[in-house]
Amino acid sequence: MSESSLKEKTAKGLFWGGFSNGAQQLLNLAFGIVLGRLLDASDYGMVGMLTIFSAIASALQEGGFVSALTNRKEVCHKDYNAVFWFSMLCSIIIYILLFLAAPLIAGFYQTPELVPLSRFSFLGFVIASMSIAPRAYLFKNLKIKETTIISISSLGISGTVGILLAANGFAYWGMATQSITFVTVMTVLNFYFSRWKPKLEFDFRPIREMIGFSSKLIITNIFNIINNNLFSVLLGKFYSAREVGNFAQANKWNGMGHTLITGMINGIAQPVFTSVADDKARQLAIFRKLLRFTAFISFPAMLGLSLVSKELIVITVGAKWLPSAYILQLLCIWGAFIPIINLFSNLIISRGHSSVYMWNAICLSILQLTAVCAMYPYGLEWMLRIFVAINIGWLFVWFGFVRREINLRLYDMLKDLSPYLLLSAALVTGTHYATRPIENLYLGMIAKIILVAGLYAFILWRLQSVIFRESIEFLLKRKRA
C-alpha cells in the first residue's frame, strides 16, 4: 500500500472512529443521565458485581480471534467459519458452567438476587459469540463507516429499551435487558454489513494455526479485565452495593471519556501497523505520529473531565451521586494515559508478540492486586491513588518493549507526549483556581470548558502545532466534501 493511500485510509479511519465513538458517548451521556435519575446506586451495584464474570467469559469465547485474523496475511472463508463455530461452542460451554456457578457467585457477595440476574445477564456473551467472525471481517478490512452504523444503532435501540424498563420499575433488570438488547442488535447488524454467512462445516484446522497467538491474547484480556474490575470485586466483597454503585458510576464516566479516544485509535492502529510491519522505519514514523495525535486528544479531554467532575455528576445524575465525583477525578488521571498505553500494546500485537502483551498484563495485574490489597486498610482514596500511579508508571515498561521492536528512543517518546501533557495540566490547574469564585454549577462548568478548550486551541495555533493544523485541515476538507 502506498504512503498516500495508507495516510488517506488512516485519516478516514480516525475520522469515522472519532465520529462513531463521539456519537456513542453522546448517546451514553443521554441514556446515562436518564438512568442515573431513575435508578439508585444499589441498582448499578447489582449489575456491577457481575461485570467481571461477564467480561472474563466474553474474553474466553472471543479467544483473541479478531486480532489473530487481522494479523494473518491471507484469510479465506474457512478461517472465519472455523472461528464462528469454535466461538459458539466455547460460549455455550462457558454459559452452562456459569449457570451452574450462579449460586456460588451470589454466595460470594451474599446477595441471593444475583442468581437469576446472573443467569439472565450471561446470555449476552452467547449471543455476542455469533458476531465474532463477521466483526473480524469488518475490522480487518477497515470498514469503519459500517462499524459506526452498527455501534450507534445498537446503542440507540438498547438504550431506549433500558430507559423504558427502568421507568416502569424493572430497576437493575432493565439494565441487564439493555445489555442483552445491545449485543443482539449488534450481532444482527454485523452479519448484515459484512455479508458473511457461516457454512455447516466443522474444520478447526485454522483454529490450531491461530491458537498459539490468540491464546496469549485470551490470557492477557482476562488479566486486563481483572485489573479493570478489581475495585468492583473488592468493594462488592467488603462494602455495600451502594459503594460499588458509586464506583461504577464514576468508572462509567471515565470509561466514556477514554473509550472515545481509544476506540478511535483501535479502529485503525493494528491494521495499519500490520500493513507496514516489514518496514520498521515507516512503522516508527507512523507510530510517532499516532502517538502525538493520541496525546493531543487524550490529555486535554481526560484532565478536563477530571476538572468538571463535580459539576458533571451533580448536573447530570443528581446530588445523590456526589460521592462518585472525587472517584472520577482520580480515575480520569489514569484515563488520560489509557489510549496511549493502548497504542503501545497495539504496536506489540502487530509485531506478532502476543506473549509480550500477555506477560505485561499478568505482571501488571499481580502488582495491582498486591498493592491495592496492601492499601485496603487505608481506605478507597489511597487504593485509587496507588492504582493510578502504578498504571501510569507501567507506560515505561511498554516503552521498553516498543523500543526493542522499532528503535523508539525515550527522548522521542517524551518529546511527543510532554508538550500536550504539560500544557493540559497547566491549563486545568490554572482554570481550577481561576473559576473557584463561581458558585453556580452551570456557569462554573461552562467557564471551565471554554477556558481550557479555548486556550488549548489558541496556544497550539500560535505555536504552529503540526498535529493541530493537520486535524483542522482534514475536518475542513471533510466539511467541504
Image (tube, rainbow, N blue to C red):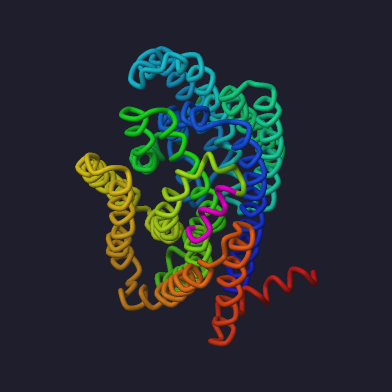
Which residue is painted at 51% across and 54% down in the image?
309
Looking at the magenta stretch, what is its main secondary structure?
A: helix
Task: Say if residue 241 shows up in the picture.
Answer: yes
> Outermost residue, right direction?
480
Residue 377, by quadrant, is top left
Residue 8 at what x, y percent from top left? 64, 68
Residue 265 at what x, y percent from top left? 53, 58
Instruction: Give the quarter of the figure containing the N terminus.
Output: bottom right
Observer-nearest residue: 63 or 69?
Answer: 63
Observer-nearest residue: 169 or 298?
Answer: 169
Magenta stretch encompasses residue 457:
no
Q: Is residue 472 left or right of residue 341?
A: right
Residue 127 at what x, y percent from top left? 58, 26
Name above or below for residue 342 compared with residue 465.
above
Which residue is painted at 58% across and 42% down in the image?
318
Q: Is residue 175 left or right of residue 64?
A: right
Task: Say if residue 350 shows up in the picture.
Answer: no
Observer-nearest residue: 22 or 40?
Answer: 40
What's the magenta region? Answer: 306-314
Name above or below for residue 476 compared with residue 10.
below
Which residue is painted at 49% across and 45% down in the image?
322
Q: Is residue 117 left or right of residue 351?
A: right
Residue 98, by quadrant, is top left
